[in-house]
Amino acid sequence: MLEERKSADHFIELIKKSKRGKFKLYIGMSAGVGKTYRMLQEAHALLGSGIDVKIGFIETHNRRETLEQLKGLPLIQRRKLFYKGKELEEMDLQAILNLHPEIVVVDELAHTNIQGSKNEKRWQDVNEILDAGINVISAVNIQHIESLNEEVKNITGIEVSERVPDSILAQADEVVNIDLTSEELILRLKEGKIYDQSKVQSALANFFKNENILQLRELALKEVASQVQRMVETEVVPARLIRPERFMACISSNEQAAKKVIRKTARLANYYNSKWYLLYVQTPKESADRIALDKQRHLINNFKLATELRAEIIKVKNKNIVKAIMEQCENRNITTVCIGKPHITLFNIILASDTFNTLLNKLSKENIDLVILS
């Protein structure tokens, strides 16, 4: 009976997937590269071909070229909300679902909705639209991708608060990079095509430095390349030729170090389009009645982050961390174990253990890679 239920559930999932809308995502290295402009150009082409396409939400930033492209396209009116005494506009999710166009254009995927909206984030709205069988064209900047948060902060010195989980990118049926050279982007900025002239000098001195743009451009190109590789492996290459990579990140209760290990492991898993796990071994010293409350909060936040990045969480109790890692490698068919660099607590515990060599020998014997993340 259980097997029949599983079979039925699998069939239902296949039906749901076939009814789900297609998702096209434009990615750019920064604001001003032309993602919104390109989406509107595509909307005009679709409309000219007799396709029922509507604009669900577009942020023009009062750019003249973008405003010109918006002319002649059918807009779904935004809904008005009052927040802190001000009248604000937000995308009308229910109106999109009611009208049910064949294709809807939704800009600013990483946007945080106004308090009082059905969903906290616009990417959650997009998920609902796709689930309703409506095709979506959307856009996001590379700095808003969750697993790249640390890298973007290191490049720009800015921590981006509005972020999109990598799982959303993995759902995209088509990913397109909108690319410009750093010279072209800076020229657009100086000409006032990105921000008002009063903000240009500040932008040039901060986010839009040439070295920042080059590094963000590299990130964007790599991201799109990895998404294309994922599609090739899942849709073109026969499954039997694909090595089933499985990553496992091992963390301690060290908050900052753990976040870096989680994000970097997620990037590796995303590149190989593979399943990954987060392992936390609770030693007797970190039992619920002994661990500090702030460390408990950090762990909960790290589990939440890993879940958002599509990890399966493994929590085990064991006084021998190395033994616990080895057991999980065997039980889960892990191909790569990821741990933090030497100053991280977990590494010190493993290194101090007499069984560290046993772990290395086991990993080597089972053809499992060990990655020490910086």
Image (cartoon, helix red, strand yellow):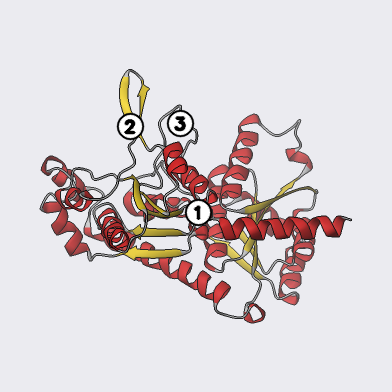
Q: Element at badge 3? A: loop
Q: Is residue 34 visible?
A: yes
Amino acid type shown at disc 3 = Ser
Q: Find the distance from the CA under tag 1 to the CA under tag 2.
A: 24 Å
Number of residues whose C-alpha sits closer than 10 Å to that of mark 2, classed few (under 14), some (14–19) or many (20 or more): some
Q: Which residue is mark 2?
A: 89
Q: Are marks 1 and 3 in contact (CB under 8 Å)?
A: no
Residue at 20% from the left image edge and 59% from the top image edge = 185
Amino acid type shown at disc 1 = Ile
Amino acid type shown at disc 2 = Glu
- Across and down, in percent, residue 179 comes to 28, 65
Q: Find the distance from the CA under tag 1 to the CA under tag 3.
A: 20 Å
Q: Which one is in front, 313 or 359?
A: 313
Does 310 sit left or right of 90 as displayed?
right
- Comes first in the chain, label 3 or label 2: 2
Q: Farthest residue toward the front?
A: 50
Q: Element at badge 2? A: strand
Q: Are marks 1 and 2 in contact (CB under 8 Å)?
A: no
